[in-house]
Amino acid sequence: MTSPGSKNKELTLSKEDIFFVKSIAKSLISPHSPDFDDLVQEGSIAFLRALATYDENKASFRTYASRCVKNAMLDYLRKKTRLNMRELAETWEYYPLKEPDDILDLKIELEALKEKLTDTERKALDAVLLCGSIKNASSHLNWHPKKLENAITRVKKKAQRA
């Protein structure tokens, strides 16, 4: 692993550093996921920042770097989830449909999906579509954000299977 505060001021990643970052990414999502490379990139940038900001008096470098890398990856995944939910809401609410049949098809698809959902999942989907984000929807429903995230994850899985 690259040593923090080394005399070489050029910040680079060794193969061992990349393996370290990839191992953290694998703990969060599958290596076969389309987002895996983006997650590794976010983690690599965070690793380089950790090299530059490490204070040896506070923690071991490996502990500090793993925390920085994992937090950057989680931020990326949260942001991506927010964007996907916003896109879903925009598709439903504001999609510029040209034909009336398109609107009907979209409504039929959404209603078919809602029939497969539990009451909790249906409430979660409606709240996110209405509020535009997990945070706003959890306050709207007065639910813990994790409960809402779990419900939305189940909705996504059911939508993919449909």
Image (cartoon, rainbow, N blue to C red):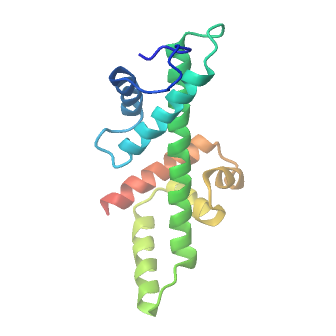
Q: Find residue 25 and report its image quarter.
A: top left
Please tell me whether residue 161 is drawn above or below residue 29 in the rendered image: below
Q: Out of 70 and 109, give the one closest to the viewer.
A: 70
| Picture quarter with the N terminus | top left
| Residue drawn at 48 percent across, 13 percent down | 3
Point out residue 155 in the picture as x, y percentages from the top left corner: 44, 55
Q: Out of 104 and 40, give the one closest to the viewer.
A: 40
Point out residue 111 in the picture as x, y percentages from the top left corner: 44, 72
Q: Residue furthest top?
A: 57
Q: Out of 71 and 41, give the one closest to the viewer.
A: 41
Q: Out of 80 and 135, give the one closest to the viewer.
A: 80
Mark count: 0
Point out residue 47 in the picture as x, y percentages from the top left corner: 50, 27
Residue 122 showing in the rendered view: no
Residue 10 showing in the rendered view: yes
| Residue drawn at 34 percent across, 49 percent down | 34
| Residue drawn at 54 percent across, 45 percent down | 78
Point out residue 154 in the picture as x, y percentages from the top left corner: 43, 50
| Residue drawn at 46 percent across, 33 percent down | 44
